Amino acid sequence: MKPVGLMLVVVGLGLVIVGLLVWAGAFSWFGRLPGDIRVESGHTRFYAPLASMLLISVLLSLGAWVLRRFF
């Protein structure tokens, strides 16, 4: 059970760090990447954060790989 507990502590600390960075405004650029599609006309708005979703997918895949590799 020690490896599971250590993994939970590491993931929890990572979430706290990311939460503090979001709260401080360090990710204000997120959602405005060059590949994000935003169309506004009249009363209609469409937003498809393609580049942002791709970045999240890569970061989550990298995090899962690190956790599987070291735990």
Image: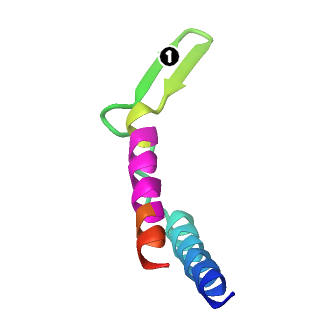
Quarter of the image where one finds residue 52:
top left
Helix or strand or loop: what does disc 1 sit on? strand
Check disc 1 and give the amino acid type: Glu
Residue bearing mark 1: 40
Which stretch appears magenta?
A: 53-64
Residue at 52 percent across and 25 percent down: it is: 47
Q: Quadrant of the N terminus?
A: bottom right
Residue at 46 percent across and 40 percent down: it is: 53
Q: Is 21 drawn above or below residue 39 in the view shown? A: below
The residue lying toward the viewer, choosing from 17 and 63, is: 63
Q: Is residue 32 left or right of residue 18?
A: left
Residue 37 position, x and y percent, is 41, 24
Residue at 66 percent across and 85 percent down: it is: 5
Q: Is 1 drawn above or below residue 51 in the view shown? A: below
The answer to whether residue 65 is seen in the rendering is yes
Tell which residue pokes out farthest to the top in this image.
42
Residue 59 position, x and y percent, is 41, 56
| Residue 57 magenta | yes
Label 1: few (<14), some (14–19) or many (≥20) C-alpha neighbours in 10 Å: few
The answer to whether residue 30 is seen in the rendering is no
Residue 29 position, x and y percent, is 39, 49
Secondary structure mostly seen in the magenta stretch: helix
| Residue 1 magenta | no
Q: Is residue 55 left or right of residue 44?
A: left
